[in-house]
Amino acid sequence: MDPLLAVCGILAAIAVGAISPGPSFVLVARMAVAQSRSDGLAAALGMGAGGVILGGLALLGLQALLAQAGWLYTGLKAAGGLYLLYLGVLIWRGAARPVDSLPAAGPSAAGFLRSFLLALMTQISNPKAIAVYGSIFAALLPEQVPLWVLAALPLGLFVIEAGWYAIVACFFSATRPRAAYLRSKRWIDRLAAAVMGALGLRLLAEAVRP
């Protein structure tokens, strides 16, 4: 396959996957609406950095490794499931806590870094995302990969992942979505926690299934 067509195909497939709702979407949306736009954008950057890491692993042949070492993919599923359950418990426990509708004095570096790292860990701990990246790269990359492709792909992945989740963060941190969240915070948070927990349990079930 022509390298340019391969890059376009990979980026298009990753864009479709990023737009599909999942734990990353739930996390970024909740950060933006429950905390601040700054936290949501920090999470978007974390998702972009996670995409670069997953793309780098795919370039190194992660899909071939997972195909030969089934135990590794099973372990990734178990770890990812436990992490999502942990996030679900955190969100559920914070559901009853009130949120001040007035903005804070300003975004802090510690809060920005925390949101960034939380999103990054959510992205790279998702075994489904790891498998999708590996499969797409294995299917579309040419045998001989030019150097410009090695430089262009990580940049393109970052723009797609961070760009999409920045749109999500900006939308959910707008006045109307935030006001709606504040009116029903407890139930929205519990729904988000239930989604995270259900996804985590599903991964754990897949990990222990023969």
Image (cartoon, rainbow, N blue to C red):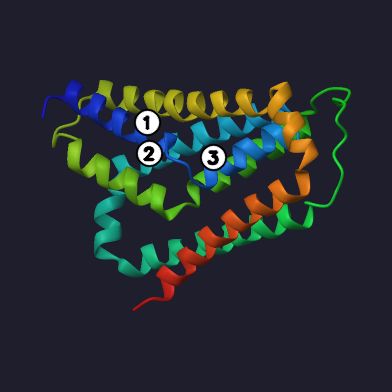
Quarter of the N terminus within the rendering:
top left
* Residue for point 33% across, 22% down: 152
Q: Which residue is mark 2?
A: 17
x and y, in percent, of residue 191 in the image: 65, 52
Lateral position of residue 69 relative to residue 38, left or right = left
Assess whether mark 2 and mark 1 are in contact (beta carbons under 8 angstroms).
yes
**CB under 8 Å between callouts 3 and 1?**
no
Q: Report crowding for label 2: few under 14, some 14 to 19, many 20 or more residues within 10 A (C-alpha).
A: some
Residue, disc 3: 25
Identify the disc placed on residue 15: 1
Does residue 75 sit above or below 61 in this rendering? Answer: below
Say if mark 2 contacts mark 3, CB within 8 Å: no
**How many labels sit on residues?**
3
From the viewer's side, name the closer residue of 33 and 145.
33
In this orientation, which residue lies closer to the viewer: 40 or 73?
40
Please tell me whether mark 2 sits on a helix, a strand or a loop.
helix
Kind of residue at disc 2: Gly
Q: Residue at x 55, y 23 (%)?
A: 167
The amino acid type, in three-letter code, at marker 1 is Ala
Whether residue 173 sits left or right of residue 123 in the image: it is: right
Q: Position of residue 40 (x, y in %)?
A: 65, 31
| Residue 120 to residue 206: above or below | above
Q: Distance between the Cα atoms at labels 3 and 1?
A: 13 Å
The Cα atoms of the two marked residues, 1 and 2, are separated by: 5 Å
Q: Position of residue 91 (x, y in %)?
A: 71, 52
Element under label 1?
A: helix
In whole angstroms, how far apart are the C-alphas of marks 2 and 3? 11 Å
